[in-house]
Image (tube, grey):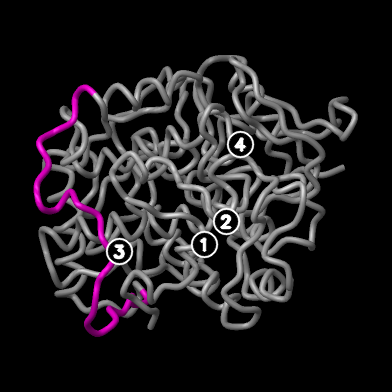
Amino acid sequence: MNTNRFDAFTRAMGSRGTRRAALGGIAATGGLALLGRALAQDAATPDASAVPATPASGPLRVRKNAASLTAAEKEAFTDAILALKAKPSPWINGLSTYDTFVLWHRDAFNCDIMAAHMGPAFLPWHRVFLHLFEQQLQSVEPTVNLPYWDWTVDNTPESPIWADDLMGGDGDPKEQNAVLTGPFKKGSWEITVFDYADAVRSPFIVRSMGTGFMAKTLPTAEDVEAALAIAAYDAAPWNSTVATGTSFRNQLEGWQDCVSETCDPVSGMGPKCVGPHNLHNRVHLWVAGEFRFASQAEPETIDGTPVPVAIPSADPATDLMGTMSFNSSPNDPAFFLHHTNIDRIWTQWAAKHGNVYEPTSGATMGMNADDMMWPYAMLGMHVTPNMALTTEAFGYTYE
């Protein structure tokens, strides 16, 4: 019996039509068409900051540990995020620059796309995503670099990144787990891009750190070392069903003991897994709390029969999910600190095993080494996984 099941919860939520989960891979159909129309027909007039580019020369920028930022650096970083929330998108009319990134991440889960998760491009796709976001931050504040959150060390709700001068704190259970402190608190930060099947559409960030059924603690340094010890970047069949311990990418993404993937118009893309969720996945779940999954569905065994396990119940009057559990998880700016750390761990693996990527063929479109990646190709950005294997190619390094 394993109480850390995730896929059964996501399938149940998809069939109920209440929400989409960032880590379950459930996505509504039609996202490609929606985004295609937005880019093709409603494109904003490009400005200089809309042209993505890698730096031609100059010293490497340094991404620092968020816990070591000075007061001035924290203020510049959070102010730049707030500025992007107010700045019109250079790509899509009617959206802010910040919300464009939320939309891209949400639609990357679409069954017609599946550009960024459950496959080899997970790491290069997010590296380009972070780079493009960092460029936009620097368009309003040139001194800003993305910091990273080392969750193996700063692993409690009292850690420095949750202070009032950075990400703000945990959600308040008396206020529907809304974040009420920091620059992105309720009333100062409004969520406007939602998962397709999210019936609640909470306009504020929701966090419930470590209270969920599947992620009561954050990953440890030992968990990271176990992933770094895996010599192969990835392995066939190049998805979430890769055998546990044979793929660095899959281990870091957090899928374990997955036996199949399915995609249908109701439930979208979702792996069926019987193992725990760790590292990248676990961090999303820890921040979010994912308590509605725990109360609305029962886990299953590998043959699909229910597991006789007591599942904590949530207040039935509270139909909220933590923001970091959604496909639109970048609505919580903590997303970027988390994924910058994932990118940093990839650099550690590359230092040990080399700047390699696989496969060259055999994976879904966008996941092979020389495939153009969505949506960057639509922005005029010629970038493939093979072109995103080093941080130096994008002009930065880690502290």
Give me the C-alpha separation between circle 1 and circle 3: 38 Å
Residue 24, label in figure? 4
Quick one: 218 or 368, which is closer to the camera? Answer: 368
Name which residue type carries label 3: Ala
Q: CA gap, disc 2 to disc 1?
A: 5 Å
Q: Earlier in the sequence, mark 1 or mark 3?
A: 3
Q: Which residues are magenta?
A: 41-65
Tell me if label 2 and label 4 are in contact, CB under 8 Å.
no
Q: CA distance from mark 2 to mark 3?
A: 40 Å
Instruction: Name the image quarter holding the C terminus.
Output: bottom left
**SS for dot 3:** loop
Q: Which residue is mark 2?
A: 369
Q: Main secondary structure of the magenta part?
A: loop
Labels 2 and 3 touching (C-beta < 8 A) = no
Mark 1 or mark 3: which is in front?
1
Q: Nearer the viewer, residue 136 or 364?
A: 364
Q: State which mark lies toward you, 2 or 3.
A: 2
Q: Within 10 Å of the Cα at label 1, are there few (<14), some (14-19), or many (20+) other Cα atoms?
A: some
- Residue 175's place in the image compared with 355, above or below, is above
Q: Which of disc 4 and disc 2 is earlier in sequence? A: 4
Left or right, residue 87 beside residue 176: left
Residue 377: where, in percent of width, then height? Answer: 37, 44
Does residue 371 appear left or right of residue 279 in this picture? left
Task: Tell whether position 43 is magenta.
Answer: yes
Q: Residue at x 9, y 36 (%)?
A: 45
User: Is 109 placed left or right of 169 in the picture?
Assistant: right
Image disc number at residue 386: 1
Instruction: Please report the residue visible at 73 percent of the width from the left and 73 percent of the height from the top.
Output: 231
Dot 1 amino acid type: Asn
Mark 4, secondary structure of its residue: loop
